[in-house]
Image (cartoon, rainbow, N blue to C red):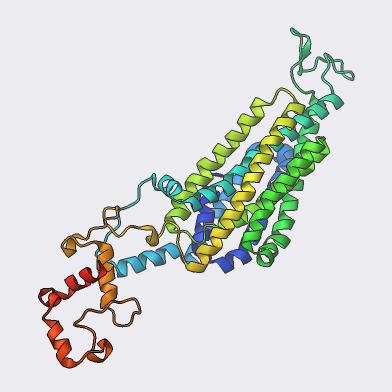
Amino acid sequence: FGSVMVSLFWSFANSNFNMKQAKRSYGMMVATAQLGSILGPTFVNRYSNTLGIPTCYMVGASSMLTLQVTMWTYVKMFGVAEDKKEKEVVETKEEDPKKKNKAGILEGIHLFMEHNYVKGIFAISCLFMVEVTIVDYTMKVLAREHFSTEYPCAPHDEITGEAMSCWDADSNSATGMSTEATQSFTAFMGLFGQATNTLSFFLSFFGTSAIIRKLGLRTTLLLFPSICLITIVVVRMYPTLHVVFAAMMILKANSYALNNPTKEMLYQPTSSNVKYKAKSWIDIFGARGSKALGSVVTNAFSTSASELIDKGSLVGMCVASFLIWNARFMGKKFEEFTETGYVVGGDNDEDDDDEGGYSEIDENNQGLSKNVEMAVQQNDAKDTSCGFYGDDEIGVEEEGQSGSEAGDDSDGVNGGMSPKEKHVVELV
């Protein structure tokens, strides 16, 4: 659900909102989503013991059903931009003799490999998860050590005298966390979820749209990777549980409030194929792959918390530095494309040749070069300053000759040549 439905929602939003509407509305969308992130864990923590886990699952399933009904109502009321485009294509189909081949299931990968702009969106959408995974695992390791020390596992409970489940009698050592430590760790993670989503809600509701409108998308893109770099440096300098907790809360909240809306706006100057096909590959496989890459880093340095902080923070700083460079590149390209009206993956990327390859020779023009033919067409235009006029096109007054002189020259060297051949000779 998290991989597919969220990606499709943002694809739908990018297809139906222009840039002005996106700046005004995307922050509110993210803020509304955070309300669900706050209410969901709060409901489970409060009613899971009284109502039971199956009832909580039923409430969650009902919420997803409500989502489908809401989307169906929206489409019925306002329509979909893609449907309007399809109607326009059907109306103009008879006038356009060229037919495009239907895209295959690998069209998203093809678009990703072909356009650097799509690669840049991938980097902004996914690579920060490498940093978040490293810091998140570091926080959990420190929290586990903290609560295991505060509530150590012993062979027998001091109050009841019963054997503790975390103690292995055969090896005579602790194999897990005590009941008190597990409960404290669970409460700690619940507090983390509520604090993170609450901070993200306020940032999204009050800050996202205002920041984008005031600073512009190009500058806003630089904020999140810069925050990531500063946060990881602070974690490296002060590797305590409270500092890592605050760092993780800042990273998560700003990824929702800043990174998500801005990276979705980057899809504005792209075609529908990029918005749906390439985006689905990026959000589903790219995001999971980035988390897996972060897990590889944490697994490589998981022998101790100090080594994880030392080596993992270096990896995080390298990734953050690259994302800052990528954000500058993407901000520049975004402004360039929006100003010129260029559409990434659109009709302006297609070759003139029907088979997809470009040919310098025009078969319909007796083997003449296309560049020469273009020059001939420009030469024929009378209202261009770049045209070269033939002898038969220049007036007597413009040539500075008398009528008789002009008549004598007309039967000269070029007399037996066609006008098109004359232009080719003159250009050569």
* Left or right, residue 225 beside residue 286: right
Observer-nearest of 262 and 316: 316
Say if residue 312 shows up in the picture: yes
Name the residue: 52% across, 57% down: 267
Quarter of the rendering containing residue 353: bottom left
Observer-nearest of 307 and 405: 405
Quarter of the rendering containing residue 406: bottom left
Observer-nearest of 249 and 263: 263
* On screen, residue 56 above or below 388: above
Name the residue: 71% across, 36% down: 313
* On screen, residue 126 above or below 14: above
Name the residue: 24% across, 61% down: 369
Name the residue: 65% across, 61% down: 28
Residue 221: x and y in percent read 63, 56
Residue 16: x and y in percent read 50, 64
Farthest residue toward the right?
A: 159
Residue 84: x and y in percent read 40, 67
Quarter of the rendering containing residue 345: bottom left
Quadrant occupied by the N terminus: top right
Residue 363: x and y in percent read 18, 59
